[in-house]
Image (tube, grey):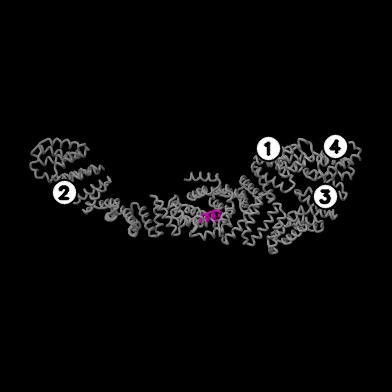
Amino acid sequence: MKNYLVLFFSGLICITASGQSTLYQTSTQRELDQSLLLFDKELFSASLYDHTAVLSGDLDYDQTYTAELHRAISALELESPDGAGLMKSYIIDNPNHPSVATAGLYLGDHFFYKRDYRQAIEGYELVNPNSLDPATQADLYFKHGYAYFLLEDYTRAAPLFDHAKGLGQPISADAYYYSGFIAMQNGNNAKAISDLEAASKSPQYQGKTPYLLSALYFQQGSYDQLIGFAEPKLSSGASLDRAEMIHLYLAEAYFEKQNFAKAAENYDAFINARKGELSREQVYKGGVAQFEIGNYPRATDYLKVSANGDDAVAQASSYYLAQAYLKQENYQFAATSFNAASKLDFNQKMKEESLVNYAKVNLQNGSFQLGITALDDYLENYPNGTYRTQAEGLLSEALINTSDYLRALEQMERINNKSPRIREAYQKVAFYQAMIYYRDQKYNPSLAYLEKSLTYPIDRELVLATRFWQGEVQAAKGDLPAAIKSYETLRDLRPATNHPYLIKTHYGLGYAYFNSQQYPRAEEQFRLYTEKLRGRDDKQYYDDALLRLGDCYYVQKRFAQAESIFQRAIDESNSGIDYAYYRLAVVQNFQSKNADALYQLDRLISSYPNSLYFEDALYQKGQINMEQTNYQQAVDEFTRLIREKPSSPFVPFALEGRAVANFSLQQYGQTAADYQRILKDYPNSENAETALKGLQETLAMQGRSGEFGDYLENYKSSNPASGSLQALEFEAAKALYFDKNYPKAISALENYLRSYPESAQKIDAIYFLGDSYFQTGQVDQALSQFKRLETEQASPRRLRAMQRIGEIELARENYAAAIPYLEMAAQNSRNKIEEAEAVKALVQSYYATQAYGKAISSADQLLTLDGIIPETTPTALLVKAKSQKALNRGGEAENTLMQLVNEYKTIQGAEGLYLLALSFQEAGNFIQSNETIFDFSGPFVDFDYWYGRMFLLLADNYQKMGEDFQAKATLESIVEKSINEEIKAMAQAKLNNLK
């Protein structure tokens, strides 16, 4: 303010100089001088008071001007309410006085610097610019204009800035800058550029104008001018306002000129400045620029951001993102991105190409079902599409590799004019589907699809395979004549002597003839099979066929040849060596080579105590000793069998043999006891009548004939004469059971047991009744009947009932209760099927009760029973892996799961693949988890729950990796395509959280 006061005083000196000689001659002047002195000392309150007082006196013209002006200034400085009014009145009342212009400037500046721009404008408008020198005039115009500018009244501000520009004063640079800014806001780019270029010549604006000029050059499309202007500015190292925006304008300009290297450089520079965000379209351009210069990883950083959405930018971004992933051989991400681009309709050419590429990437990645679905969609939606021929070729190849064969066949059957490639694919896919039905024991559908495969007999090798498997399926179905016919049809096609399917046909025919009791023909086929495979590394079923060849000789009573074959099996360490020992002993016995026979039996008994033929061997050894009159040795063998295998069906016959041997040793008490035990425990056995006669003779020799009557009466009640009512009723009820007419069997068996509660057939009747209830789903009643047999004597029916109890408790998830019954069944099983069923149930029960060590050992046992019943090995591997993981043996678990996934395309394999991928995720190996899913999931597409769980896991992995776009696209695909409602709900919930 001091400077402004000096300005005023200098103006007043010239006004009052002529009156100096008389100034002090009057008292009024002295008062005025005193007031001015107070003003000069900025004692404005006193000055205001004194000048007001002076004005009440008798002042001359000049004294009045001076007093009024200083009073007004003092009032303004004091913020007096009437300050502005006093100054305005002074200006208005004295329009021609030389001080008016300065007074107006003072009024305007007073409010200008207090940021009261409206009152500042009022002050400036009271000034006549023409009365001012150029510098002051320029200052007035700029401040006046700037006040309007800050009030956003650009229309009034612009001409004032224009006036200030033309005066060529220092402040003109400011005027050029703001004038240019207003022109820019008004869209007058030419004027804006002109003004800002002028402003940029001032050091004050050299750092401020480049950003605005860059924006202007870009807005009017002057890309070369922008580049020529901005590049040197940025390279100069000077401090520039909003340098990041200059980089952005340069990036956009370079992109338009397709200089992608410079565009990419400047987009990165903008981002690295961290002072703003790109629009989605700019992010897209940044990604394309990086893609065009081959920086694919950086391109994906941009494009996966701009791909989020459902507009044209999202479609284009997804397309380029997919291409960038392809360049990096990241086929999983490429597929997801192409899929996203194919779902949007903004660019039809891009949509069409993306769909084809989506199919191709999935095929390349082994996801055949996804690829097939995409190709099918393409051919349906683009019947005259650019890529139709290519799509048809890809489809024919993919159909062969898919696991969804039914859908593949449906797709091919819709094609009216099938190309040779499609017909060839149809032949193969129909065959593959037939094999799935065969695996699932659905024999009629399997045969139907084998016939479908023969519709187009293009591939001769596949025709041979089809004929062979027709025989296999018919044999499994029990239709042996049809099986033989199919096998013979293959032979009629005259494949090479050592053709694999001809060799397999020998084996199949051998069994078909063997089971049809056509032993000479069976012998020929087993002989051909074993001759062709002998000495090979891959012997397939050679071991089994060799044993059956021996059996063929045996049943034809060609004992010498049978002996040679069984000895050969032993010499070759045949996998069925225990059977070979047993059969060799039998045929040697028939040839009266009893010493050799006993040697073979001893080898079997001592080396293979868990063999299924252990009981047979003990019994046979007892029989041979009987033949040789080695009665005590016979007693020992029969006793061992009775003691060690109490549930064996050989027990009543072993008791008979021991009784006869003891009789020969004149040990009549033991003889009678064995006969009595047969009649008591096995009253309905085949040798019961023989035991009755033997007992009668033995008791007579001991003088105990009186005891025989009771045994005779019991025998009669247990074995009524043929044609009696009791026998007829039991046989009728049993027939209903074996005919699988379970409801009627239940009624008949209940009536029988009520009528004959102590019948010798009671155990059989109870078992049949329990199983009839079981087969009709009446599990509680079945359990009640089976448990009745717990207290009965050992027998095959009782053993089977115990296994059934275990199965029922297992199905009810009463695992602890199931285990004792299943263990009993496993330990006493009479054949491999019973053993496999019991061990499989034990594996599940041990795992459920957290007995993981036992679960693993039982799983290992189940693995030795591969193929006896369906899915034994995959079940064993799955439970073994889960148990290993529960015991923190993660490495072993992963190896087991890998074996399962590689070898078994079953539901267990599907769950195993999910668990394997999950284990990698839990270890933080997200990429390995994803690769595992993509590499191995294709064959498991039919198992929709576990297949869906895999891809939910995939989405989780993407999210953990920061790949939200991939996670979202994956979840959307699951929601769209999954047929499992539980999986869809899980995916939708995750999608909602992701959004």
Magenta stretch prevailing secondary structure? helix
- Foreground of the two, 354 or 918: 354
Is the N terminus in the top left, top right, bottom left or bottom right quadrant? top left
Q: Mark 3: give few (<14), some (14-19) or many (20+) Cα within 10 Å.
A: many
Closer to viewer: mark 1 or mark 2: 1
Task: Provide the residue designation for mark 1.
Answer: 780
Mark-to-mark CA distance, 4 and 2: 155 Å
In the picture, residue 265 is in which quadrant? bottom left
SS class, disc 2:
helix
Q: What residue type is labelled 2?
A: Ser
Pointer 3 with pointer 2, Cβ within 8 A:
no
- Foreground of the two, 267 or 371: 371
Q: Which amino acid does label 4 sit on?
A: Glu
SS class, disc 1:
helix
Closer to viewer: mark 4 or mark 2: 4
Residue 69 badge: none
Task: Provide the residue designation for mark 4.
Answer: 713
Residue 828 spot, x, y in % from top left: 74, 44
Is 97 part of what is drawn in magenta? no
Above or below: residue 611 compared with residue 460: above
Closer to viewer: mark 4 or mark 3: 4
Q: Can residue 896 be seen in this view?
A: yes
Task: Provide the residue designation for mark 3.
Answer: 621
Q: Mark 1: give few (<14), some (14-19) or many (20+) Cα within 10 Å.
A: few
Above or below: residue 360 compared with residue 618: below
> Which stretch is magenta?
365-378
- Foreground of the two, 178 or 79: 178
